[in-house]
Image (spheres, grey):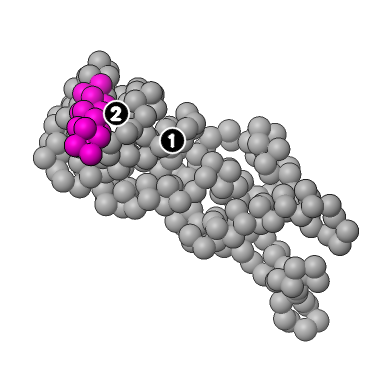
Amino acid sequence: MSDKNDLESNKTDFLASVAKSTVGMVPFAGTLLSEIIGRIIPNQRIDRLTKYVQELDEKISKIPIEKINNLMDNEEFIDLVEEGFVQASRAITDERRRYIASIVTNGVTDETIELQESKFLLKILQELNDIEIIWLRFHQVPTMGSDEIFRNKHQNILNPVRAYVGANKETLKKSALQKSYNQHLERLGLIKNNVRIDNRTEQPKFDKFTGQSKISSTETTQLGKMLLEQIGLMEEDK
């Protein structure tokens, strides 16, 4: 048992050492953040963290060094940066690492948001998968014929899949997943669905197939807009 514990301890020390050395090679952010990374959870993916630090360095190097130095003793800043590293160690796409780096950087540069609020947005981001982020961005500009670059880029995700009587299992599964993505966004308070009302009865219309209220339109909430802005997607592809 002790041999196993020693092995795990050495592995953790080795990963932390490699991570700190890797971060230290990055010109700007690496020097400032190399000590912070030593506090991150064990068994992290060094390659993912390396890519994340490079992304973070590109963004944070534009901030005056004095501002960063003044934050190094700020516990909320340290907490935000640590949370970024934790999530980056699990991020498997470059897009996700870019989102995380944007939130961390904006937490320092955006005067309209507090560091604690930036960490809150990081936690919300953690709740979303990459497909749900694409749907959130889609709802920001829902008008037909608009935002064509973005829609064409992600048409394999955004093309609606309708469940209907007699549909095959694959269609039903895809429709259920697509609906669940938007339901999750709504539960998190990132989008708001407007129920379709019957003009004659002034009561909500219901889908005979699902038994649920029909949706006339979907809009991004203020929280959803804030998240899109902080991850750098509000203006992307417009």
Residue 60 is tagged as 2
174 relative to 74 in the view: left or right: right
Q: Position of residue 231 (x, y in %)?
A: 43, 40
Decide which of 29, 7 is in the foreground and name it.
Answer: 7
Judged by depth in the image, the label closer to the viewer, 1 or 2, is 1
Q: Quadrant of residue 51?
A: top left
Q: Nearer the viewer, residue 17 or 6?
A: 6
Q: Which residues are magenta?
A: 1-18
Return the residue found at the far bottom: 201
Within the magenta stretch, is there residue 102? Answer: no
- The residue positioned 71% from the left and 38% from the top of the image is 156
Residue at image point 23% right, 24% down: 14
Residue 206, quarter of the rendered image: bottom right
Q: What residue does disc 1 label?
A: 91
* Percent of width and height locating residue 16: 23, 28
Quadrant hosting residue 60: top left
Image quadrant occupied by the C terminus = top right
